[in-house]
Image: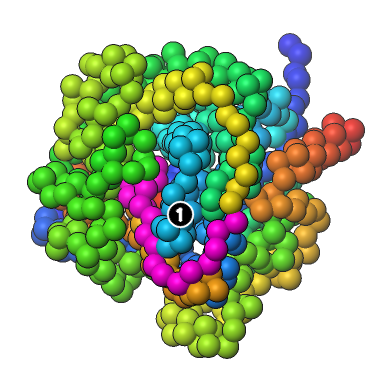
């Protein structure tokens, strides 16, 4: 700390262990927080413009490139929007395969965040890789859980990143019994490790209570695919009307647009889903994680990690049930006739609600699109939480304050590639 | 007392420019099964996705993903080149700019539309591939990069180190 007592100028540059690039600037005067600016600094790639004029069938592979880590979410949501625009209903088997694709994504993406980004904060170390010699079992487990999710994604989508099998209308290929059996073995093998992971995050004492409005797509089987959008206050909005309840907020110092729901900041993601929809978790998950589930609904921002860990278990249990009970048959992918019109897709991506609106012309080319990304939706709420958390930290050394704020940001698991990429705190 | 020299390890850096970080995610997927095999042979000293304390000096292998969209990125890439024995372009963005540099190919109307934002954000008029900016020693193609191609490059330099 420098300047007079109670003054602080803090600027964190390029926050580590998140997806993408973000900076944070803070000004405190006389013990009062004067300014907090979360500056998403990811360079723009102009996907909103790039999709215009492109044929609908090429859309999924193009938008997949918006985000390396959650590409399957972009693929799936875009396909849903295109199919709605073309008035096409996917087959029940296609819907099951999409559930599996999202389960594989959630396991791999959450495992990366929980073991590699956030676990160092729990253990008070810089990187999990430091434990290669002192705790090789933990490092091995971290890679194995991530690999199990990867195996499921590869089985269903062709590969974990920019999967090639998922198309508008259906899947170009389906898992065989033998292939499913190999993945089932991997999923079952990591279940005990996931129970340990849940325990670690349930026992982590880190706490910051935030009065946030949680918003999530509440689904029947907690399957991230179909349902209604609900918030903590009981507001219920059909998927296709979501946009009408949003305000787009230009944040001059950020490369990503912010959003308000019903005129207020809000929070999307695993904690929102767990707060609003935990009753629909897989029965085996509810049985095995019953103690941790008692902690919800939770206002503790750090419980986003615990919610993610429980979701990993839920996705394992759901995927095991689907794979064990289904004989997949190859279905021809229909060639859909182009028609003019709008289609909306809404799903739960790992970090929260993902919304796609695509308008097609009569030749089936995209006229324009409107994409609402989870980390952009959380931006205003995250900035407000940082401002509210900060007074509790004042008086500590600057480095400690910066570290505490980075932990809070990491708990949100932001993705700045999506929102435009991660965090840079600038010490002004 | 016998003194044994510390085993030599390749100093590895992983750098992300403008893109979706899919290649770094792919790299982390390769570590699922290669980490323990490589742990005494490579030292990942720079990787913002894995650690806060990073050191980009004196690298043996620098992996670079993404396209170059602004002067700060170009300067950083030149610095990486100066500090690294071998620079590896991973993924198509690093090799030919695409898909991140797609705006270079926009029709005139769209180019005009994004112009105010490009200027406001201080991005280059035309995005560049890292291969246009610095000499690159190895390329791993694919979007995302081919995992097997990445493994081959790492193992090639591990083998060279062990011989040399």
List x then y, in percent, for residue A134.
53, 18
Say how many tags the image has: 1
Q: Residue at x 57, y 16 (%)?
A: A185
Q: Residue at x 58, y 51 (%)?
A: A334
Furthest-right residue in this view: B163
Query: In this rendering, would B158 be left or right of A99?
Result: right
Q: Chain of mark 1?
A: A
Q: Which residue is mark 1?
A: A88
Quadrant (top left, top right, bottom left, bottom right) of the C terminus of chain A? bottom left
In the image, residue B113 lies in the stretch drawn in magenta: no
Q: Is residue A121 above or below residue A365?
A: above
Image location (x, y in percent) of residue A181: 60, 18
Residue farthest top in this picture: B1
Name which quarter of the figure residue A8 lies in.
Answer: bottom left
Q: Quadrant of residue A34?
A: bottom left
Q: Residues within 10 Å of mark 1 (few under 14, many from 20)?
A: some
Q: Is residue A18 above or below residue A105?
A: below
Point 55% across, 19% down: residue: A184
What residue is shown at x 44% (from left), y 80% (from top)? B117
* Vertical order, A201 against A276 (above or below): above
Magenta range: A335-354
- Dominant secondary structure of the residues highlighted in magenta in the image: strand
- Which residue is at the front of the view, A355 or A330? A330
- Tell me which corner region of the image, top left, top right, bottom left or bottom right, holds residue A321: top left
Q: Nearer the viewer, residue A230 or B81?
A: A230
Along the viewing direction, whichever of B93 and A408 lies nearer the viewer: B93
Whether A180 is drawn above or below A68: the answer is above
Residue B119 visible in the snapshot: no
């Amino acid at each position: 700390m420098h300047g007079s007592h109670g003054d602080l100028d803090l600027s964190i540059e390029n926050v580590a262990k998140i997806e993408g690039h973000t900076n944070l600037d803070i000004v405190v005067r006389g013990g009062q927080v004067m300014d907090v600016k979360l500056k998403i600094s990811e360079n723009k790639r102009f996907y909103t413009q790039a999709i215009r004029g492109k044929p609908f069938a090429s859309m999924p592979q193009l938008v997949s490139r918006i985000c390396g880590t959650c590409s399957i979410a972009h693929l799936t949501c875009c396909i849903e929007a295109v199919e709605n625009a073309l008035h096409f209903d996917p087959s029940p088997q296609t819907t099951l395969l999409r559930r599996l694709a999202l389960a594989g994504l959630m396991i791999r993406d959450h495992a990366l965040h929980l073991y590699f980004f956030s676990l160092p904060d729990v253990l008070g170390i810089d990187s999990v890789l430091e434990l290669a010699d002192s705790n090789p079992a933990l490092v091995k487990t971290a890679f194995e859980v991530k690999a199990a999710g990867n195996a499921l994604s590869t089985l269903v989508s062709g590969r974990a990143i920019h999967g090639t099998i998922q198309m508008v209308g259906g899947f170009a290929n389906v898992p065989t019994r033998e292939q499913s059996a190999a993945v089932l073995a991997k999923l079952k093998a990591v279940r005990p490790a996931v129970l340990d992971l849940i325990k670690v995050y349930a026992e982590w004492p880190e706490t910051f209570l935030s009065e946030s409005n949680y918003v999530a797509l509440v689904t029947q089987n907690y399957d991230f695919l179909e349902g209604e959008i609900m918030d903590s206050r009981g507001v219920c909005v059909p998927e296709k009307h979501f946009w009408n309840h949003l305000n787009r907020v230009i944040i001059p110092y950020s490369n990503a647009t912010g959003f308000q729901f019903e005129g207020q900041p809000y929070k999307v993601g695993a904690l929102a889903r767990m707060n609003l929809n935990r009753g629909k978790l897989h029965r085996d998950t509810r049985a095995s994680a019953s103690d941790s589930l008692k902690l919800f609904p939770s206002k503790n921002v750090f419980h986003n990690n615990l919610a993610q860990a429980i979701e990993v278990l839920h996705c394992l249990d759901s995927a095991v049930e689907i794979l064990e009970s289904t004989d997949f048959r190859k279905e021809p992918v229909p060639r859909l006739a182009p028609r003019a019109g709008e289609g909306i897709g809404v799903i739960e991506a790992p970090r929260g609600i993902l919304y796609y609106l695509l308008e097609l012309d009569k030749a089936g080319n995209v006229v324009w699109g409107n994409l609402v990304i989870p980390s952009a939706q959380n931006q205003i709420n995250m900035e407000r939480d940082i401002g509210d958390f900060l007074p509790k930290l004042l008086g500590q050394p600057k480095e400690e304050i910066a570290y505490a704020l980075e932990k809070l940001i990491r708990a949100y698991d932001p993705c700045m590639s999506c929102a435009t990429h991660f965090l840079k705190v600038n010490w002004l | 007392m016998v003194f044994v020299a510390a085993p030599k390890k390749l100093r590895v850096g992983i750098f992300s420019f403008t893109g979706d970080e899919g290649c770094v995610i792919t790299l982390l997927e390769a570590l699922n099964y290669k980490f323990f095999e490589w742990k005494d042979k490579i030292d990942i000293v720079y990787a913002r996705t894995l650690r806060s304390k990073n050191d980009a000096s004196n690298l043996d292998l620098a992996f670079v993903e993404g396209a170059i969209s602004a002067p700060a990125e170009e300067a950083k890439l030149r610095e990486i080149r100066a500090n690294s024995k071998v620079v590896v372009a991973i993924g198509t963005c690093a090799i030919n700019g695409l898909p991140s540099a797609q705006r270079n190919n926009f029709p005139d109307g769209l180019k005009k539309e994004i112009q105010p934002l490009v200027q406001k954000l201080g991005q280059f008029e035309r995005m560049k591939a890292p291969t246009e900016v610095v000499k690159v020693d190895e390329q791993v193609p694919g979007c995302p990069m081919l995992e097997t191609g990445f493994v081959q490059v790492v193992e090639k330099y591990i083998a060279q180190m062990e011989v040399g």
